[in-house]
Image (cartoon, rainbow, N blue to C red):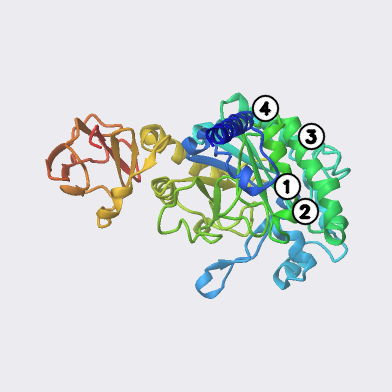
């Protein structure tokens, strides 16, 4: 009996050592139980703020209708869906297209005006760095199939063969990485009008989609792979875990790459890497009003569209104050913000978008300590009446006021009196008193001349948790 037990123990010990060795080497297999064990890289959860870029042939017409649809608010405004809306006979797109062009003018003809002649990747990268972003995600290929790099799987429908005759993705990647930011790529799993996708999806996946994604990863070594367009097929049909096993085991970025959750029509908020929401509308049940204990990211535009939309006016853009409050709110719930810009067809970032990013950068230069590499403070629910959000780092608590308090504020759930308290960016001190687990802070009066920043203000409470 003892011999049998010894043999069993020896077998289990050997199996555990082997299993530990396999996982230590990053040996993932092609199923969700395996690839879901791979953690989201720490750099991503620390980064908090990224820039999304939608740029392609759709940037030439740069148009989508804006109209109200009851409780949904603005609707049908994504300019990057221009080709599909024409093909599906959307009346507003058809009316606009016929008025501006002609019935014989095809979407593909727009590529000849996608010249990007004013594109300066170093200027873009510097703007993103100054905005306080830590990563960038570029649309390498949207649903129209047009690739922003010289992909051998998009012959004569890529940025080198036709249009600007330039490796847009490669040039921007080099510039972004030179500034020290992380670089990633959005990739559409679907292609609306690719005959293989429409008629033989299995061949499309094996001979086009997966080889093209591997080409993109191998050549440009992204820090993020951000798929989209997953809603037609399950992840099994798309062979998503096959690709992820390769990405985590064999690719040149296997140790550092982050991925999202858009790998099949059943995978959002269930499988993959970080979870994604979109304008708080896509799979937002888990994160809109309560935080979840999984890395996640909200993506949205500064306006209503992702691609540049000439139909949008000033009122359609979020203000700098709204965007800073948005960032603060998402980070305080444990998420990242991926804020989109839509460049023009000639390669410029619209001035209003530059201005918004500049304001966010000014705010983050003062208050970034309360954003980057922080965690939510789960006790904050007891302070719902206070116009503030909370983040933590080690034993420090950051109270981010979206409306500066006029008087004393009591914060519940603070274990001890802080060693020090102050407003970030200001020499003014904050007086505190502590009783039980209630901390009362008395912020100093701030005037236009003494306020360290606009839109939101941070009180740092040192060593109180």
The residue that disc 2 covers is 144
In this rendering, which labeled residue sits more in front, label 4 or label 3?
Answer: 4
Query: In the rendering, which numbered label is found on residue 56?
Result: 1
Farthest residue in the front direction? 1
- The answer to whether the residue labelled 2 contacts the one labelled 1, judged by CB atoms less than 8 Å apart, is yes
Q: What element does badge 3 sit on? A: loop
Query: In the rendered structure, which disc, 2 or 3, sits on the residue that comes first in sequence?
Result: 2
Q: Quadrant of residue 258?
A: top right
Q: Residues within 10 Å of mark 3 (few under 14, many from 20)?
A: some
Farthest residue in the bottom direction? 70
Give the CA separation, mark 3 to mark 1.
13 Å
Q: Residue at x 59, y 55 (%)?
A: 268
Q: What element does badge 1 sit on? A: loop
Give the CA separation, mark 1 to mark 4.
19 Å
Q: Quadrant of residue 117?
A: top right
Q: Residue at x 54, y 37 (%)?
A: 1
Q: Is residue 76 above or below residue 172?
A: below
Farthest residue in the top direction? 178
Q: Residue at x 80, y 61 (%)?
A: 101
In this rendering, which labeled residue sits more in front, label 2 or label 1?
Answer: 2
Percent of width and height locating residue 206:
83, 47
Q: What element does badge 4 sit on? A: helix
Percent of width and height locating residue 425:
30, 32
Query: In the rendering, which numbered label is found on residue 174?
Result: 4
Quarter of the rendering occupied by the C terminus: top left
Q: Residue at x 75, y 37 (%)?
A: 216
């Amino acid at each position: 009996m003892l011999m049998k037990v010894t043999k069993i123990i020896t077998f289990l010990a050997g199996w555990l050592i082997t299993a530990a060795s396999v996982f230590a080497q990053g040996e993932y297999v092609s199923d969700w139980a395996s690839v879901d064990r791979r953690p989201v890289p720490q750099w991503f959860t620390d980064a908090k703020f990224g820039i999304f870029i939608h740029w392609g042939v759709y940037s030439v017409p740069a148009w989508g209708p804006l109209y109200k649809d009851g409780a949904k608010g603005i609707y049908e405004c994504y300019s990057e869906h221009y080709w599909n809306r024409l093909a599906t006979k959307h009346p507003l797109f058809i009316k606009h297209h016929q008025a501006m062009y002609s019935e014989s003018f095809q979407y593909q003809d727009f590529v000849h005006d996608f010249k990007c002649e004013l594109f300066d990747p170093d200027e873009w990268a510097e703007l993103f760095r100054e905005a306080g972003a830590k990563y960038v995600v570029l649309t390498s290929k949207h649903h129209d199939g047009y690739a922003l790099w010289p992909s051998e799987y998009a012959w004569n429908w890529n940025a080198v063969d036709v249009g600007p005759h330039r490796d847009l993705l490669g040039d921007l990647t080099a510039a972004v990485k030179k500034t020290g930011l992380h670089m990633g790529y959005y990739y559409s799993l679907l292609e609306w009008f690719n005959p293989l996708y429409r008629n033989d999806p299995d061949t499309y996946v094996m001979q086009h989609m997966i080889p093209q994604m591997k080409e993109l990863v191998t050549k440009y070594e992204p820090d993020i792979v951000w798929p989209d367009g997953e809603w037609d097929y399950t992840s099994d049909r798309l062979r998503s875990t096959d690709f992820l096993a390769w990405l985590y085991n064999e690719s040149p970025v296997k140790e550092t790459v982050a991925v999202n959750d858009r790998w099949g029509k059943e995978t959002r908020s269930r499988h993959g890497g970080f979870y994604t929401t979109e304008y708080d509308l896509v799979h937002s049940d888990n994160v809109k009003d309560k935080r979840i204990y999984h890395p996640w990211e909200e993506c949205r535009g500064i306006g209503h569209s992702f691609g540049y939309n000439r139909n949008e006016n000033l009122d359609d853009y979020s203000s700098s104050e709204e965007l800073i409050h948005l960032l603060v709110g998402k980070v305080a719930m444990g998420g990242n913000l991926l804020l989109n810009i839509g460049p023009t067809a000639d390669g410029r970032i619209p001035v209003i978008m530059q201005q918004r990013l500049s304001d966010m950068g000014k705010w983050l230069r003062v208050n970034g300590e309360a954003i980057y590499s922080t965690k939510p403070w789960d006790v904050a629910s007891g302070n719902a009446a206070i116009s503030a959000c909370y983040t933590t780092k080690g034993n420090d608590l950051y109270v981010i006021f979206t409306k500066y308090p006029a008087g004393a504020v009591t914060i519940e759930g603070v274990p001890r009196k802080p060693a020090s308290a102050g407003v970030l960016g200001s020499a003014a001190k904050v007086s505190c008193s502590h009783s039980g687990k209630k901390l009362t802070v008395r912020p100093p009066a701030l005037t236009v001349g003494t306020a360290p920043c606009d839109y939101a203000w941070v009180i740092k409470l040192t060593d109180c948790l």
